[in-house]
Every structure is written in C-alpha cells, then in structure tokens.
Image (tube, helix red, strand yellow):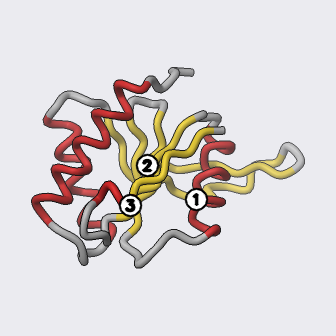
C-alpha cells in the first residue's frame, strides 16, 4: 500500500482551493467532486471518484457498503461536503472509510464556506 506524504496533501489542498475560488460556495457536492477530479488530473495526480468500499462482517463480504467521493494516488481519501458545518458523523464517516480502505490519511473538505481554509479537516488514523 502506498503511503500518503505531506507534499501530496498540500497539492490536493491547493487544487481544492483553486476549485473553490473558481466556483465559490453553495453548489452541490457532486459539482465540486467533478471539478476537483479535473483539477487534480490536470496537474498529473492519479485520482478516482466514487470508489467502492467493500464491507465484511465475520469474514463474509456484504457487498459494496459505501463509496468514497475521491481517492488520490491510491493513498489519500477525500470526503467532500457542502454543509453549514461539520458534525461528528462526518468525521466518523471519514474514519470508518479510512479503516475499511486500509488508508492512514484523509481530508474532509467543506466547500460551503466563504474561505475553503475554514472547511478543511485533516484526518489521520
């Protein structure tokens, strides 16, 4: 498994800020997701959207339980929101996705802020 380094995190945050600067707050999460995928691909960063997250219980596959909004370079989870504020459920969602994917780092990004820097939560497990 790849390890996510700080350089990648900073590049992703920079790309997210460019998307937010261009589009502003108030749009659907799916719009920001598509724009961020375009932005990351343009700078040569491997990116996948709507990545299936399989869930197992007692060794039995339960099928696809969830989908990660964006996975960057096979090592960084991005969960995008367009909400007034983060709730504990948003953080729990990211932590659960990280655990299920076997990743160590994620970003919770809330595009519904006047300044994106106020809507960034770094998550590590």
**Residue hosting label 1:** 66
Question: Disc 2 on helix, strand or loop?
Answer: strand
Which quadrant is home to the N terminus?
top right
Q: Nearer the viewer, mark 2 or mark 3?
A: 3
Q: Nearer the viewer, mark 1 or mark 2?
A: 2
Q: Nearer the viewer, residue 123 or 61?
A: 123
Q: Residue at x 58, y 49 (%)?
A: 53
Mark sitting earlier along the chain (1/2): 1
CA gap, disc 1 and disc 2: 14 Å
Question: Disc 3 on helix, strand or loop?
Answer: helix
- On screen, 1 above or below 107? above
As drawn, the label of residue 78 is 2
- On screen, 118 above or below 5? below
Q: Residue at x 10, y 59 (%)?
A: 22
Alpha-carbon neighbours of circle 1 within 10 Å: few (<14), some, or many (≥20)? some
Q: Residue at x 18, y 54 (%)?
A: 19
Q: Is residue 99 left or right of residue 121?
A: right
Alpha-carbon neighbours of circle 3 within 10 Å: few (<14), some, or many (≥20)? many
- On screen, 122 above or below 117? above
Mark sitting earlier along the chain (1/3): 1
Question: Disc 1 on helix, strand or loop?
Answer: strand
**Residue hosting label 3:** 119
Residue 109 is situated, as x and y percent measured from the top left of the image, at 40, 57
| Circles 1 and 3: CB atoms closer than 8 Å | no
| Circles 1 and 2: CB atoms closer than 8 Å | no
């Amino acid at each position: 498994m790849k390890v996510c380094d700080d350089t990648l995190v900073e590049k992703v945050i920079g790309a997210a800020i460019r998307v937010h600067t261009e589009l502003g707050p108030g749009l659907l999460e799916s719009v920001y997701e598509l724009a961020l995928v375009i932005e990351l691909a343009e700078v040569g960063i491997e990116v996948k959207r709507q990545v299936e997250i399989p869930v197992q219980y007692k060794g039995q596959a339960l099928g696809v339980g969830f989908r990660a909004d964006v996975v960057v370079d096979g090592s960084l989870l991005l969960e995008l929101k367009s909400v007034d504020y983060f709730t504990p459920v948003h953080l729990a969602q990211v932590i659960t996705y990280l655990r299920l994917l076997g990743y160590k780092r994620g970003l919770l990004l809330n595009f519904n802020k006047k300044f994106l820097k106020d809507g960034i939560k770094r998550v590590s497990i």
